[in-house]
Amino acid sequence: MPTPDSPAYVHVVDDDASLRRALTFLLESVGWCVIGHGSAEEFMTRFDRGRRPACLVLDIRMPMMSGLELQQLLSDRGIRVPIVFLTGPGDVAMAVQAMKFGAADFIEKPFKDQVLLDAIGRALRRDSEQRMEKRERQALLDRLNRLSPREIEVARLVAEGLPSKTISQRLDISERTVQVHRLHLMGKLEVHSVAELAKLIWLCDGAESGE
């Protein structure tokens, strides 16, 4: 949950002005910063990902651009922000589709305040975790970027479990040179075993592919 000096942002997107005001009052009462938007288009114009945890409370049915269309637009632009959809009694099929596309939750109107607060709390924790994972992936990539192109080649072959002699033959360099590269790259990457090196290479490959 957010701390008082670093509140999370909750973006409320709903064309019903009275509902937006009510939700803003409710969410601000528990310490969240609330930004209301009367349409999906207005949200896209004003939205700033920022550095604080955030989530989106989004009406699934709106004129012009629907909640589902906004969800797709965010996905197309690579913007990952957890979404809690607000749905009507006849919107179950749409809500299921939204969940398949990665929505954090959906709440059917009319809803109890605590049900919505709990859903938003989970969404914000999810965003915090995603942000932490992104920072960790970037830190791994930064470590790998310390290596020269040749050291990266050696690192990948060492991570595969190949001995220095085999690596020297593959790269057409001396076995002594392989050992020097290996010593340097282990120090730069701050790893102490082949197992640690293999894990780091695997995690970095996953980070680069966005997995």
Image: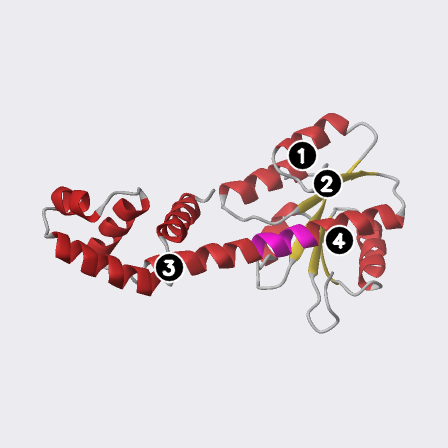
Q: Kindly identify which residue carries mark 4.
A: 121
In the image, 32: left or right of 73? right
Q: How is the image coloured?
A: secondary structure
Mark 3 or 4: in front is 3
Q: Residue 98 vs residue 197: left or right?
A: right
Q: Look at mark 2 in the image and give the residue it sits on.
A: 105
Q: Give how far across and how far down residue 174 sits, in percent.
A: 10, 52
Q: CA distance from mark 1 to mark 2?
A: 7 Å
Q: 63 or 3, which is in the foreground?
A: 3
Quadrant where the N terminus lies? bottom right
Q: Earlier in the sequence, mark 4 or mark 2?
A: 2
Q: State the residue at coordinates (66%, 29%).
A: 97
- The quadrant where residue 73 appears: top right
Magenta segment boundaries in residue numbering? 125-131
The label shown at residue 178 is none
Crowd around label 4: few <14 · some 14–19 · many ≥20 (10 Å) = some
Q: Main secondary structure of the magenta part?
A: helix
Contact? badges 1 and 2 (CB < 8 Å): yes
Left or right for 154, reference 188:
left
Q: Secondary structure at mark 3?
A: loop
Q: Residues within 10 Å of mark 3 (few under 14, many from 20)?
A: few
Inter-mark Cα distance, 1 to 3: 43 Å
